[in-house]
Amino acid sequence: MIGSGVLAGLLENWRVSFDEHRVKDIVGLFAEDALFQGLSPRLLVGRAEITTYYENVPAGMTAAVELLHSRTVGAEAVSGFATVTFTDASGVKLPVRLSVLAQHLDDAWLIRQYHVSKLG
């Protein structure tokens, strides 16, 4: 299934870059005009704002990703849900639900919309 394969690969690339705090690589996975809401209530648009967000993630933070569901939205778009468990340097875990939409743009699959909400 194209949807699960695309999202699994994209989210794995995001996780590896996130764990290694490679902000440029993380942001490169997003479309230029991506819509983004992370753990703060602030709504972000575009790579510049997403860069600032990820630059402020504390050192040592890691993520575990479990893709829960995906759906092909069209020939060039997939959406899905995942559970992401963030772990800070002291071992405290924060599970969230991720809703993501990816689109095939410029010969690559990029995240167009990213939204997390805390679980529990």
Image (cartoon, rainbow, N blue to C red):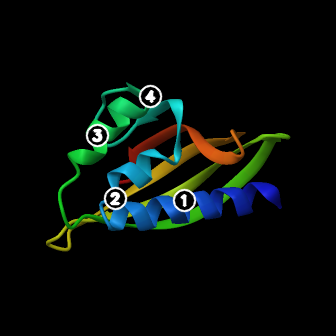
Q: Earlier in the sequence, mark 2 or mark 3?
A: 2
CB of mark 4 within 8 Å of CB of mark 3? no
User: What element does badge 3 sit on?
Assistant: helix
Q: Secondary structure at mark 1?
A: helix
- Residue at (44%, 28%) from the top-left corner? 46
Whether tag 2 and tag 3 are in contact, CB under 8 A, the answer is no
The answer to which of marks 4 and 1 sits earlier in the sequence is: 1
Q: Residues within 10 Å of mark 2 (few under 14, many from 20)?
A: some
Residue under label 4: 46
Q: Mark 3 — residue?
A: 53
Residue at 33% x, 40% y is: 51
Task: Identify the mark nearer the N-term, 4 or 2.
Answer: 2
Left or right of residue 56: residue 83: right
| Amino acid type at mark 1 | Leu
Q: Quadrant of the N terminus?
A: bottom right
Name the mark nearer the viewer: 1 or 2.
Answer: 2
Number of residues whose C-alpha sits closer than 10 Å to that of mark 1, classed few (under 14), some (14–19) or many (20 or more): many
> Front-most of 24 and 81?
24
Circle on res. 22: 2
Q: Secondary structure at mark 4?
A: loop
Q: Amino acid at mark 4?
A: Gly
Q: Amino acid at mark 2?
A: Arg
Distance from the alpha carbon under mark 4 to that under mark 1: 18 Å
In the displayed structure, would residue 110 be above or below residue 45? below
Q: Which residue is mark 1?
A: 11
Q: CA distance from mark 4 to mark 2?
A: 18 Å
Decide which of tag 3 and tag 1 comes sooner along the chain: 1
Label 2 – label 3 distance at C-alpha:
13 Å
Asked if labels 2 and 4 touch by Cβ distance under 8 angstroms, the answer is no
